[in-house]
Structures are given as C-alpha cells and as structure tokens.
Amino acid sequence: MIFVLADDLTGAAEIAGICLRYGLDVSFGIDTVPKKEAAVTIIATDTRSLTADEAYKTHFNLAQNVISKTNNRIFKKCDSVLRGHVLTELSALMDVTEKSSVLLQPSNPKGNRCIKNGSYFINDELIENTGFATDPDFPSKTSTIKKLILDRTTKAHSFDVHTGQIKKIESKGIFVPDCDSVEALSESIHLYNDNMIIGGSAAFFEQFLISLKLTNSRIINKKRQIFNNYMLISGSTHPESIRFAKTLEASNCMLMLFPESLINQEFNETVLDDFVIKIKHVYNENKKVALRISNEIIPFEKSASYLKKRMSLIVKRLLAITNINELFIEGGATTYHILKTLNWKSFTPVEELDLGVVRMQYNLNPKKYITIKPGSYAWPNGLLN
C-alpha cells in the first residue's frame, strides 16, 4: 500500500486523478486515514496555511498512524514550486520513520517547471522573476532550491540540502536533483530505495508508480459526461477563475455574487439567511447555480478568513434545504474549509474529468459528489452547460 500525505487539497486530488488514470484503487481522506483500504490512500491536509509547528504536528501524527500498519510506503506530496513548510513536514516524517535521507523532486517538466544547476525555472525564467515572487504566503525571492527550502523553514533542524547533478545518495539529508526533462524526471526515481523518504510533485508521483510497476494497464478515461444539476463555488482569485465566472454570466447558469453587506467585516446573519433563500430559488428554477464572493479584491483585514467562513456556512445551509448532489469547487483553501464545515472527511475518487479536475463520491452519502480543481486550472470545455 502507498500512503500519500499532501499539504493542500487540490494537490491531493491531482494525485487521485493520476491513480484513476491508471485504474488503481484509491481512497481519499481529509486530515484522517479513510477506513476504506486501497492500493493508494491519499490524505489531504491544509498545512500550507498553518504555522510550521502545526504543520509538523499534523504530519507527525498522520505518519505515526500510517507507519503503524505494515509494509506501507509514504509519498510526501509537495507543491511543485516548494511553497509551504516543506522541510518541516519532511522532518516530521523522518522523526517518525527514523529515516535520515529524503529524495525530493518537485519539478514538472511537462508544465515547464524545471530545476537546472540547483535553481528553479518557470518557462525558462528564474522563478524569482515570475509571479511567484509576489506570492502572498510563500514568495519566491530566490531561485536557488537550497535557499528556497531553508528560507521557508522556521523550526530547528540539522539536515543538509543537496542540489545539482546527483548520481547517488549515500549520506543523510534532503536531496533535490536537477530535472529539466521527462527523461530526467524518470532518472531521478532510480535514486530511491526503501531506506529513504520520497516526495515531490504529482508528476514525480506518476514516475514513482511506474517504478513500482503499478501502471502496466493504463486505461482510457470514459466518455466525458455533461452536468446539468449542480452548484459551482468559485473560490479562487486567480485570473482564470475570474474569466470563467464571466463566461458563466453569458450562459444559462446564473452567477451570484455576495451582496455588498456580506463582504464587509461586520457579519449580518439575517442578510446571509436571505441570500441563502435567494440562491435556493435560483437553483430550484434552473437546477444549476454558480456562487462567487466577488470579482473585485476585498480590502478589509483578514477578509479571506472571514469570507471563507461565510461561503462555507452558505453551502452548508443550502445543502440542508435543497437536493443539490453535485458540488464543483475551485481553490484548495476554499474546498478544504467547506468540507471541514460540512464534516465530510472520507471519499472515493471516481473520475478524472481533466488534468487536476477530479470527481469524488462522499462515502457517508453516496448520492453526493464533489469535483475539485485548482484555481489556476481551467474547467473542461463543455462540462458545465
């Protein structure tokens, strides 16, 4: 069995999509090990938005739970551009497993995210010269892999980070080989053995499956279905998300934005309840509705936290008074907060609708489905009519 620990929900869903692509049995849990056993078990967390201490504790506890089972491998899914508490979370796994070396490969050459001479490149540009330099939580102020990892680590550690051309691993530490092609990605996996921890991007996880000979019977996705009865929650501030929201306005799916009184710092319960009823009427009439907070930046302090809570509360109340069974949600942090509010923890991934777009069945109510995608990805053409 393979256990995947991910620091965000959409990254975890991307791993599930790869498993489905190859016909592998997969189960999916939020902050918990799902009861259903599968060839691949994925545990999604939201530790990228937590403190380093909280991220360490979460990964330490999950790893203890997983490692208590025999013959299990752990793959640490991390962001392809190394946002988050990467070294801190790896150190938690090292402490639990008592392993002292890590093979880490975050690159994704097909997505033009490569490592050359120990530095990270996006579309042949140093990452410090791209939009990732202004990321609100983990800005890439350097392109040097070693410095990127160490600068984002606040907990004390004693690990060396090794980068560049790595031909073999014979010492302790974190090893991040150069990788500028799919061939190099495949070669990186040959550095791994069961005495070390392995982690990295979804693309590297696919190579991991190939190395374990779990991908011999690759399957073709079944014919794409078109959904008519659904609620779409647009939770990302990515330009692609805003563009798609505007295309919905021109279709027969009504896009509803929060009323102005719900995007202020002060919370008005009555306004929220009235808005829920309004959304209900729109859904009952059209059997589809899209919900977005705003197409503009909300300026008040800690607005993201406040508005996520309001969005989650609206979704919970709507599900209680409607027959909505299909949820489409974009944005990992938004999805995570909604699922935590609903107390939905255990899922069975059933279909990869497109790259990074994964549909899952809620195990405690098989009529309910949720489809997740990152905010930077596009919804498949023709999916939502």
Image (tube, rainbow, N blue to C red):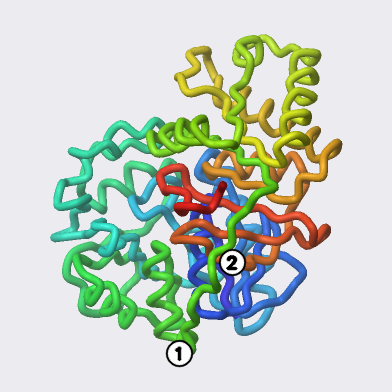
Answer with left or right where residue 307 lies relative to residue 382.
right
Where disc 2 sits, the SS reads strand
Label 1, label 2: how many angstroms apart (C-alpha)? 19 Å
Task: Say which of 16 and 164 sits in front.
Answer: 16
Amino acid type at mark 1: Asn
Q: Tell me which residue sits at (22%, 50%) in the image.
A: 122
Residue at x-position 59% and y-position 26%: 305
Query: In the image, which disc is placed on residue 216?
Result: 1
> Who's the residue at 38% across and 56% down the image?
158
- Does label 1 or label 2 sit earlier along the sequence? 1
Residue at screen point 22% across, 74% down? 184
- Reading the image, the residue beneath label 2 is 351
Quarter where residue 138 is shown: top left
Callout 1 secondary element: loop
Crowd tier of the residue under label 1, counting other residues whose Cα lies within 10 Å: few below 14, some 14–19, many 20 or above: few
Residue 86, position in %: x, y? 43, 52
The reply to whether callout 1 and callout 2 are in contact (CB within 8 Å) is: no
**Towards the viewer: 69 or 249:** 249
User: Closest to the observer: 21 or 51?
Assistant: 21
